[in-house]
Amino acid sequence: MRNPLTLITGANGQIGKELTKALRNLHGTESVICTDLKPDPDPSGPFELLDITDINKMKQLIGDYKVTQIYHLAALLSSKGEQNPQLTWSINFDAYLKILNLAVEMEIDRLFFPSTIGIYGPTTPKVNTPQNASFLPSTVYGISKLTGEMWGQYFRNRYKLDVRSIRYPGVISYGTIPSGGTTDFAVEMFFEALAKGKYISYLLPDTRLPMVYMPDVINGTLQLMNAPIEKVSIASAYNLAAFSLTPASLAESIKVHIPEFEINYQPDHRQAIAESWTETIDDSLARSDWGWAPEYDMTSMVQDMLSNIRIQQNQVS
Ligand code: SER
């Protein structure tokens, strides 16, 4: 394969920012072209404004920069997506289908598409969710991502396009804060615990959801993208998880470090979304196919989050 020249969409987002750092460390600053709808106030290398629905601009960028790999991260998440289902479909799916076609036309070597636990639905087994099961998602986010998975699989089978994908659980990180998701509480709680000593959770105390810590997301994503194609047996998207938590169990874990921390509960529309997802996931295929092995569990993640947010805040003040 050629030395990768990578284009990232949604590069200003929670995962985009960290993936950019990792890929620039691996392949050099100039080899990673970041794109986003909004300017990056602090770009660390090549950056282009890109509205993901503008496929002509995307085509021009691929040609100008001689792009060989794409990480297509731009999307609206589960909660925000419900505010405008039609727009969410255009961004999360219509744009993706155009990118799949463009990738074939422009002979892209490898394309990454993030899928999600949002593809699971009320009929999906909640415990140890299998790779293949009944998936009837209840949000437009889930519907668009599940459809995207199926089209990715179709393009791999029909056009030999090398599309790879992971069903990310809730992603916890301290760098760029997630927005518009149902799992955002697992990040917000840390910042509020440190700033105010209290947090009001929009999910009920015992709502259990699968999660993963950012360093493992980046390692896992690069592991999948660097694996030989014969190790990538799943052409739709891999189940993946590290640990599961509830708002109450996360609060207990934070209290070990901040004993005065208080949590209260005021569930909103996101409760129904969370309840339609699953609690734990069977990710054995990611483990056996390309070596997925998360380093962080809830306890080590909490310790690392708190110390890094403190470092970050001391640097600002
Ligand atoms: N983090 C996403 C959300 O909450 C799930 O993939 O929407």
Image (cartoon, rainbow, N blue to C red):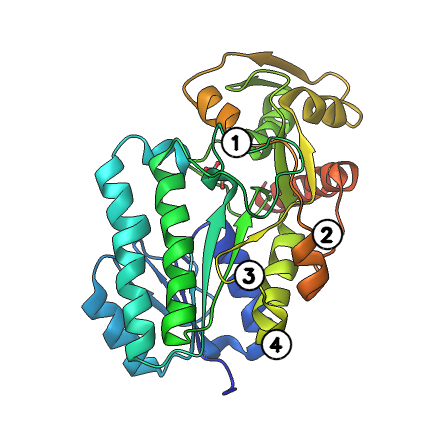
Nearer to us of marks 2 and 1 is: 1
Q: Amino acid at mark 4?
A: Pro
Disc 3 packing (10 Å; few <14; some 14–19; many ≥20): some
| Residue 294: assigned label | 2
Q: Amino acid at mark 2?
A: Pro
Q: Between disc 4 and disc 2, whose residue precedes?
A: 4
Residue on which disc 1 sits: 277
Residue at 30% of width from left, 51% of height from top?
Answer: 93
Disc 4 packing (10 Å; few <14; some 14–19; many ≥20): few
Asked if marks 2 and 3 touch (Cβ < 8 Å), the reply is no
Q: Cβ(mark 3) to ligand 1 < 8 Å?
A: no
Q: Between disc 3 and disc 4, whose residue precedes?
A: 4
Q: Cβ(mark 1) to ligand 1 < 8 Å?
A: yes
In percent of width and height, residue 25 lies at: 60, 72
Nearer to us of marks 2 and 3 is: 3
Asked if marks 3 and 1 touch (Cβ < 8 Å), the reply is no
| Residue 234: assigned label | 3
Q: Between disc 3 and disc 1, whose residue precedes?
A: 3
Q: Amino acid at mark 3?
A: Ile
In percent of width and height, residue 207 lies at: 60, 22
Q: Quadrant of residue 270?
A: top left
Residue at 61% of width from left, 76% of height from top?
Answer: 228
| Residue 285: assigned label | none
Vertical placement of residue 246 versus 56, above or below: above
